[in-house]
Image (tube, rainbow, N blue to C red):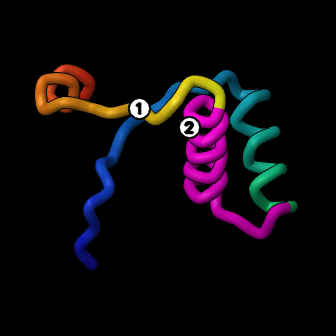
């Protein structure tokens, strides 16, 4: 199955990982889906307060590394 999503690594303390996994299960989501949900909410909250984030091609290259 092809996807446009970029795989990334993230580091958590053991307690954080266990707690976010607990929350994900309570929300009937996978850990990955829970993290995507939280990230999307963070972006929406930021943009509602500060305005839309518009990324140039330079930004896209810089932030992908």
Q: Is 22 inside the magenta-drawn segment? A: no
Q: Is residue 47 left or right of residue 1?
A: right
Q: According to the image, label 2 marks what residue? A: 43
Q: Is 28 inside the magenta-drawn segment? A: yes
Q: Residue shown at 57%/47% (left/top)?
A: 40
The relative height of residue 54 versus residue 50 in the rendered view (above or below) is below
Quarter the C terminus occupies: top left
Q: Is residue 62 left or right of residue 51?
A: left
Structural crowding at the residue carrying mark 1, measured as other residues with C-alpha within 10 Å and reported as few (<14), some (14–19) or many (≥20): few
> Of the numbered discs in the image, which one, if any, rests on residue 53?
1
Which mark is nearer the camera, 1 or 2? 1
Q: Position of residue 62 (x, y in %)?
A: 19, 20
Q: Position of residue 20 (x, y in %)?
A: 75, 42
Q: In this picture, which residue range is highlighted in magenta? A: 27-48
> In the orientation shown, which residue stands out farthest toward the right?
26
- What count of labels does the image hold? 2
Q: Earlier in the sequence, mark 1 or mark 2?
A: 2
Q: Nearer the viewer, residue 43 or 47?
A: 47
Which type of secondary structure does the marked residue at label 2 adopt?
helix
How far is disc 1 from disc 2 in space, using C-alphas?
9 Å
Which type of secondary structure does the marked residue at label 1 adopt?
loop
Proximity of marks 1 and 2: CB atoms separated by less than 8 Å: yes
Q: Position of residue 41 (x, y in %)?
A: 65, 44
Quarter the N terminus occupies: bottom left
Q: Nearer the viewer, residue 37 or 31?
A: 37
Structural crowding at the residue carrying mark 2, measured as other residues with C-alpha within 10 Å and reported as few (<14), some (14–19) or many (≥20): few
Q: Residue shown at 13%/24% (left/top)?
A: 58
Q: Residue shown at 13%/32% (left/top)?
A: 57
Q: Is residue 18 left or right of residue 39?
A: right
């Amino acid at each position: 199955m092809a996807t446009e999503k970029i795989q990334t690594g993230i580091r958590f303390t053991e307690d954080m990982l266990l707690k976010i996994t607990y929350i994900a299960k309570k929300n009937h989501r996978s850990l990955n889906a829970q993290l995507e949900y939280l990230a999307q909410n963070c972006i929406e909250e930021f943009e509602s307060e500060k305005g839309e984030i518009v990324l140039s091609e330079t930004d896209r290259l810089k932030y992908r590394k």
